């Protein structure tokens, strides 16, 4: 259990400080950072599977349907990564954090749409409150917080697809990155041929950070996979808020992004929705324990 908590906090803590890493590459275009992230992730994952001698086990799980689902989930997670990198380097860290605060409620909504799940009244109230918060920020600023919603929905649908074929995190991520790597590698070759490539051009630190993006991407996912097997899912659900909380604090206090009264109210309503969702889930679980005993 102690190891499980450690792995979970390491995973969500690393995800929380990701803005620091992408900001260090701010002079590289976001799409180019994304391409390096995908390609170097695959290199690192192939190394890990070879080291653990798991190629035979992975091949045994493959089918046309598995490959199709993981290609689609690979496209979604790549889009999510790209949006996040762009958001961080375009000074939208606070709005990006909002996406991951909303994500659990989006997951509940996706369960209704795709799995025909029936929600309890308090769960509907939580989703409604979150919608009110988003609507308020839309009216207050005259624009939809599209980055937050795009991050929440791409990651939510990605998670839903992953649940249909629950390979472990190492195997699943290898298939996902493998599906999009040819396109990303072709893009990097194109940039290099046209003299626009950043890797090995410029500072050694920049090239090192681009190459390290694979390790940085895969490591928290592996910690997450190990932690999820050792501690209850409900506990993981609470720890997940560590990541957007750190991102939010970085955006406000380190990068001094605007957080005026309108944002405070909008975020406050979303946080209230999350609190309602968590408390209702806890009480429901408490009531269900005697019934199953």
Image (cartoon, rainbow, N blue to C red):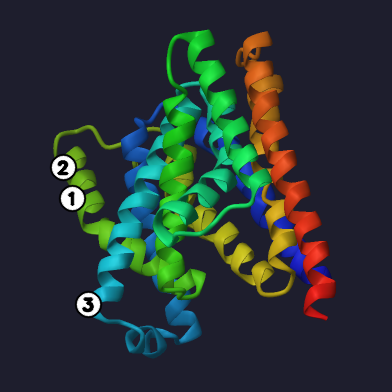
Q: Quadrant of the N terminus?
A: bottom right
Question: Which residue is at the front of the view, 101 or 190?
Answer: 101
| Image point (70%, 28%), residue name | 249
Determine whether, in the image, residue 218 is placed left or right of residue 260: left
Q: Which residue is mark 3?
A: 64
Q: Which residue is mark 2?
A: 190
Residue 203 in view, yes or no: no
Which is closer to the viewer, label 2 or label 3? Answer: 3
At mark 2, the secondary structure is helix
Which is closer to the viewer, label 3 or label 1? Answer: 3
| Image point (46%, 48%), residue name | 155
Q: How would you rate the neighbour count of disc 3 (Cα within 10 Å): few for under 14, some for 14-19, many for 20 or more?
A: few
Determine whether, in the image, residue 48 is placed left or right of residue 255: left
Name above or below for residue 43 compared with residue 63: above
Q: Which residue is mark 1?
A: 186
* CB under 8 Å between discs 2 and 1: yes
| Image point (77%, 63%), residue name | 285
Where's residue 259, x and y in %?
65, 14
Which quadrant would residue 32 be assigned to in this image? top left
At mark 1, the secondary structure is helix
Which quadrant would residue 60 be assigned to in this image? bottom left
Where's residue 107, x and y in %?
52, 51
Along the polypeptide, which appears first: circle 2 or circle 3? 3
Where's residue 118, x and y in %?
54, 57
């Amino acid at each position: 259990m102690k190891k499980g908590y450690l792995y979970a906090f390491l995973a969500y803590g690393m995800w929380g400080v990701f803005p620091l890493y992408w900001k260090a590459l701010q002079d590289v275009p976001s799409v180019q950072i994304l391409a390096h992230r995908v390609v170097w992730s695959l290199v690192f994952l192939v190394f890990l599977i070879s080291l653990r001698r798991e190629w035979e086990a992975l091949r045994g799980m493959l089918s046309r349907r598995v490959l199709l689902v993981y290609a689609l989930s690979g496209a979604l997670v790549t889009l999510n990564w790209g949006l996040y990198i762009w958001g961080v380097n375009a000074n939208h860290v606070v709005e990006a954090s909002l996406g991951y605060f909303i994500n659990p409620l989006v997951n509940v909504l996706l369960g209704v749409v795709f799995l025909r799940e029936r929600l309890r009244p308090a769960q509907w109230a939580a989703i409604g409150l979150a919608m009110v918060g988003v609507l308020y920020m839309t009216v207050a600023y005259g624009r939809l917080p599209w980055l937050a919603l795009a991050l929440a929905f791409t990651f939510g649908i990605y998670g839903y697809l992953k649940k249909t074929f629950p390979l472990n995190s190492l195997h699943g991520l290898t298939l996902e990155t493998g599906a999009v790597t040819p396109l990303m590698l072709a893009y990097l070759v194109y940039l290099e041929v046209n003299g626009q490539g950043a890797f090995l051009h410029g500072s050694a630190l920049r090239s090192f950070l681009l190459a390290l993006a694979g390790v940085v991407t895969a490591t928290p996912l592996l910690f997450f996979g190990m932690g999820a097997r050792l501690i209850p899912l409900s506990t993981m659900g609470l720890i997940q808020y560590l990541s957007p909380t750190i991102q939010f604090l970085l955006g406000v206090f380190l990068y001094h992004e605007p957080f005026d009264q309108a944002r405070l109210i909008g975020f406050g309503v979303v946080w209230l929705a999350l609190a309602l969702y968590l408390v209702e889930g806890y009480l429901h679980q408490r009531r269900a324990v005697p019934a199953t005993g």
